[in-house]
Amino acid sequence: MEIEKRYIKAMPKTDLHVHLDGSVRMSTLIDLAKQQKVELPSTDPKKLKKLLVPGLRYKSLVDYLRPFDIVLSVLQEPEALSRVAFELAEDAARENVWYMEVRYSPILHTKKGMRLTTIVDAVLEGLKQAERKYNIRTGVIVCGMRNIDPETSIRLADLAVAYKNRGVVAFDLAGAEENYPAKHHREAFYRILNNNINCTAHAGEAYGPESIHQALHYCGAHRIGHGTRLLEDGDLLNYVNDHRIPIEVCMTSNIQTKAANSYETHPLKFYYDFGIRVTINTDNRLISNTSVTKELWLATKYAKFSMEDLKTVILAGFKSAFLPMREKAIMLNLVNRELEKY
């Protein structure tokens, strides 16, 4: 029996894998371009939407990453960053997301000479503003970029260390995966791990299980972003399962980047049935034209999740949050109580 979206919307949820620059409101993008006198490929919302949200028609991850250049052109000022961070948290809170980890790479916002610290402060300010207004808790994940030199990743790791306990909850490695191995960035991860900071890594999306192996064993990742191709290595699959390493699943985005061929053939159901700790996330609300409610609904539709399965996956999100144990326990108690209604 299909679970209605309104029930899913009402349930407490997490979004542990969502990119700030991929989740800007279309109206905000046009408005910021006007304010900053930035030329967009089109100011007609319909035409712009076709460029930024072409549904499932992308050819690859690299193709999927192209629209980000358009969005980033208006995210080079502190006020713009604060605004889009606030609106992202507002959009999440409106669909009852209780906890969200927002990731982005500060280095991509330096085109007008903004300092890295100014960039982090601006995003944190927007998120804090939303926390004061809505029932949502947020954290920031700083991303190193695979396709930018490893020295830059080290700088970004140092930035994450400086903001530990000040809003930044983890470090990530994002960007084009093929030909840019995670192991080249292991120095940045050493800095992170030696400072007792959480880390995750995009892996097994545009490249095979070897990419996940490197994320775990060279970089010490505590969670895996996407992990769509973990299925291809049974030994590694069991390792991930045995060590309860959460997978940050983003179904729609995986189909757009061709990491999975269709919703029907996405490995989510296999992972869940096998016992792996799967979490359901948006990746990019704008570019994937999605929400947490929609992604969870797609999971119930295509992975045939029952209400109990849905609750298990929602709880997995809260269990996998990069939060201190005591805070997590308090939140889990509240979530459990809320989920008993369903």
Image (cartoon, rainbow, N blue to C red):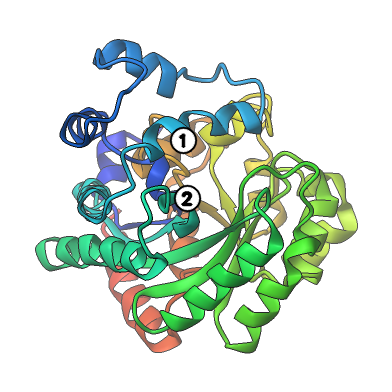
The residue under label 2 is which amino acid type?
Leu
Q: Which residue is mark 1?
A: 68
Neighbor class of circle 1 (other Cα within 10 Å; few <14, some 14-19, many 20+) is some
Whether pointer 1 and pointer 2 mark residues with C-beta atoms closer than 8 Å, the reply is: yes
Q: What is the C-alpha distance between the residues marked 1 and 2? A: 10 Å
Instruction: From the image, state whether disc 1 or disc 2 is nearer to you.
Output: 2
Task: Quickly name the residue at label 2.
Answer: 108
Residue 243 at least partly seen: no
x, y percentage for residue 210?
A: 85, 53
- Rendered location of residue 330, percent (x, y): 32, 82
Q: Residues within 10 Å of mark 2 (few under 14, many from 20)?
A: some
For the point 41% across and 73% down, which residue is it?
A: 168
Name the amino acid, label 1. Answer: Phe
Please indicate, yes or no, whether residue 111 appears anywhere in the rendered image: yes
Q: Counting residues from the N terminus, which is met first, the one under dot 1 or under dot 2?
A: 1
Give the SS element for disc 2: helix
